[in-house]
Amino acid sequence: MKDTDSTLAQFDQAGAERLEKIYLTPDVVQQREQIFQLLDVKPGMHALDIGCGPGLTSLSLAQAVGNSGHVDAIDIAPPMLQLAARRCADAKQVAFHQADVLQLPFADATFDVALATQVYEYVADIDDALSELWRVMKPGAQVLLVDTDWESCVWACRDEARMRRIMQGWSQHIPHPQLPRTLIQRMQGAGFADVQAHTIPLMNMNYSTDTFSGGMMGFIASFVGGLPDFGPQLAADWQADVQTMKDAGGYFFSLNRFVFVARKP
């Protein structure tokens, strides 16, 4: 199975709608606002939203560039693009495209600013993808990339060995599960300069489906439960354990988002 096929399988219609619900939880909304503050977006700019998902960042970019600006938003999954187009129906300055980050359908030096959240960790040929991103950015343009290292995850449980096993399985859902550790060097290798790194933690102290961890739990259990060497029983036992940690010392979840901001010289 190609990486593209694997990504599409994770974001079918049901997966896209489930992810949209997670993106709308209060903690993820707050995280998105913090990330957006690191962007230098001005009216009239031409912005690129990479892996636009359900269109939440596309809409924010549209509001920031105003009627005199333009936003091109890409995603590889049609269900995501459908959700995004619906959300941005009144934002006429946004155009959506089904496209791969390895072959961006834009001319050289098109964009003033670009944003990608949880995208490049899904791309096997990441160095080629970053070179393609460099190609479409104008000199002086700003790029912002957000990726996660799931080994930064702290999740209270009764069975630590099982938790490690679940995280080992979950790491197989992307080609680069520890991408933030090398992303500065990779961005510099692609030609970007002034790379700065920021950490934004997500923390949940109570179990609820209206939190990032509560929403992601189903994603993780479904994926790991479908792996041949893991199975649904392991995933179900883990899920039941973590959900009831409030009865055994308290629910606790923390995960770091790593944000990298750079410019094209």
Image (tube, grey):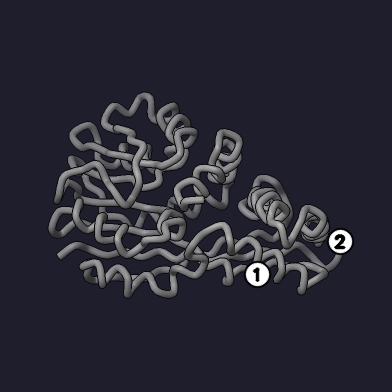
Classify mark 2: residues with Cα within 10 Å, few (<14), some (14-19) or many (20+).
few
Q: Which residue is mark 1?
A: 154
Q: Is residue 57 above or below residue 261?
A: above
- Looking at the picture, how far across and down is residue 259, in whole percent? 40, 64
- Looking at the picture, how far across and down is residue 155, in whole percent? 69, 66
Q: Is residue 218 left or right of residue 183?
A: right
Who is closer to the viewer here, 237 or 256? 237
For the residue labelled by badge 1, is the local secondary structure a helix, a strand or a loop? strand
- Looking at the picture, how far across and down is residue 234, in whole percent? 79, 59
Classify mark 1: residues with Cα within 10 Å, few (<14), some (14-19) or many (20+).
some
Q: Residue furthest front?
A: 1
Residue type of the residue flagged with mark 2:
Asp
Disc sitting over residue 247 in the figure: 2
Numbered circles on residues, count: 2
Q: Is residue 43 left or right of residue 225?
A: left
For the residue labelled by badge 2, is the local secondary structure a helix, a strand or a loop? helix
How far separated are the C-alphas under marks 1 and 2?
A: 18 Å
Disc sitting over residue 54 in the figure: none
- Looking at the picture, how far across and down is residue 176, in whole percent? 48, 65
Q: Residue furthest right?
A: 247
Who is closer to the viewer here, 81 or 59? 81
